[in-house]
Amino acid sequence: MAKTQNWEVEIDGAQYEISVKNNILTGKAILSVNGEEEVIRNKGQLAFLGIIDAPITVAGKQLQFVSIGKNADIAMDGIYLGSKEEYKSAWKLPWWVWIFVVLTLAIPVISRGGALPFLLGFLSATFCARASIQPKLKTSAKVLICFGITILAWLLLILIVFLLALLVNL
């Protein structure tokens, strides 16, 4: 599943065509500047979230390539080219998201382990972290999304426990 996005950038009077083919399944993006390709991979703590926040250099000028899931944008001089919003590093998760991350990662602890609770807690924490850094959403919407993810995760845990109890009693 690859998605291609394009931007036109003017640096020192010269035009540059930048395109990116972002593959969320492989976790890499193929960046093309005037036809020259470069592979950018997820690195660091955000790799497991499917987030790329990496510097790129075009004509000696440093730009910032940011990809969250299937959406990508490039920041030049602190402003995203696509959304025209101010660039904020994806490396800095907001303080409030850690509340939801802890609540969802508590799922495998409370349930005393197991593959399903671990997967449920890990995926819920991942979705909360990703939602918290979406540049197009307001903070209130991000908090509500994380709250919903957390509630849904705990409800799914209760459902799993209930179904397992039914199976044991058969």
Image (cartoon, rainbow, N blue to C red):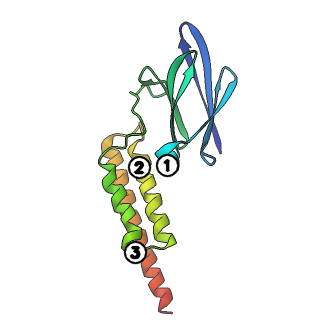
- Could you tell which of marks 2 and 3 lies nearer the N-terminus? 3
Q: Is residue 106 left or right of residue 167?
A: left
Query: Judging from the image, what secondary structure is the residue with disc 2 in?
Result: helix
Task: Depth check: give the residue in front, 35 or 56.
Answer: 56
Tag count: 3
Sort mark 2 into few (<14), some (14-19) or many (20+) by Cα contacts within 10 Å.
many
The quadrant of the image that shows the N terminus is top right
Quadrant of the rendered structure where residue 60 is? top right
The disc label shown at residue 131, or none: none
Residue 166 at x, y percent in the picture: 47, 87
Verify CB contact (< 8 Å) between mark 1 and mark 2: yes
Residue type (three-letter) at the residue carrying disc 3: Ser
Q: Quick check: 75 above or below 145?
A: above
Classify mark 3: residues with Cα within 10 Å, few (<14), some (14-19) or many (20+): some
Q: Is residue 155 visible in this depiction of the protein?
A: no
Which residue is the site of mark 1?
A: 49
Could you tell me which residue is drawn at 34 percent across and 56 percent down? 100
Q: Secondary structure at mark 1?
A: helix
State the residue lying farthest toward the bottom.
170
Looking at the picture, how far across and down is residue 70, in whole percent?
A: 55, 42
- Residue that carries the numbered disc 3 in the rendered image: 111
For label 2, the residue is 129
Could you tell me the amino acid type at mark 2? Ala
